[in-house]
Image (spheres, rainbow, N blue to C red):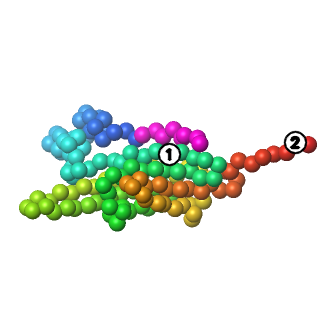
Amino acid sequence: MKLIRYAYPQSQASSAFNRLFDLGAPTIERFGSIFDDLLGAEAGFHQPAVDLYEDDQNFYARFELPGVNRDTVDLELENAVLTIRSQEETKEKSEVSRTSFERSISVPDGVELEKVSAEMKDGILTVAMPKAEARKPRQISIN
């Protein structure tokens, strides 16, 4: 098994900090968007953890989604970007709680996009991305 390094995008907190010093925006709007990013514009917003790895036949993305209902998960593949999102609303007595997340990862080159599949079991969503024949390792005989 081979692990793949994943460069995480800049965090919301650091981009909010950078926007603090952006002189193009009015002061009130600047601080409002910073607080939205730092505190979360929606209650319960987070990004699920993801592991990326590969074997000889496939690339894999394994998302950890504890307590998330399979029916609320939306998985989309567009322009070599895999996006997972979910939005769930629960009502208990007089309280309403909303939980949502979204995460996007780039699909590696050499993936047969038509054959991508996903399976969810015990709160773990595993997306298998089959390698194209040209990307698979092969044995070369020496003459």
Residue range highlighted in magenta:
1-8
Q: Would you place residue 89 above or below residue 12 in this image?
A: below
Q: From what the image shows, is residue 64 above or below residue 93?
A: above
Q: Residues within 10 Å of mark 1 (few under 14, many from 20)?
A: some
- The residue sitting at 39% across, 55% down in the picture is 122
Residue in the picture at 57% in, 47% down:
54
- Crowding at mark 2 (Cα within 10 Å: few <14, some 14-19, many 20+): few
Q: Nearer the viewer, residue 15 or 91?
A: 91
Quadrant in which the C terminus is drawn: top right
Earlier-in-chain disc, 1 versus 2: 1
Q: Residue at x 48, y 50 (%)?
A: 61
Q: Amino acid at mark 1?
A: Leu
Say if the magenta span includes residue 106. no
Q: Left or right of 131: which side holds 71?
A: left
Place of residue 142 in the rendered image (x, y in percent of width and height, measured from the top left): 87, 42
Position of 129 with respect to 119 (left or right) is right
Q: Residue at x 35, y 57 (%)?
A: 85
Q: Is residue 26 visible?
A: no
Residue, disc 1: 52
Dominant secondary-structure state across the stretch colored magenta: loop
Question: Which image quadrant: the N terminus?
Answer: top right
Secondary element at image label 2: loop
Residue 73's place in the image compared with 50, above or below, is: below
Q: Which residue is mark 2?
A: 142
> Residue lying farthest left?
94
Closer to the camera in the image, 124 or 106: 124
Q: Nearer the viewer, residue 105 or 4?
A: 4
Res. 91 in view: yes
Q: Secondary structure at mark 1?
A: strand
Three-letter amino acid code of the residue under disc 2: Ile
Give the number of the disc on residue 77: none
Q: Are marks 1 and 2 in contact (CB under 8 Å)?
A: no
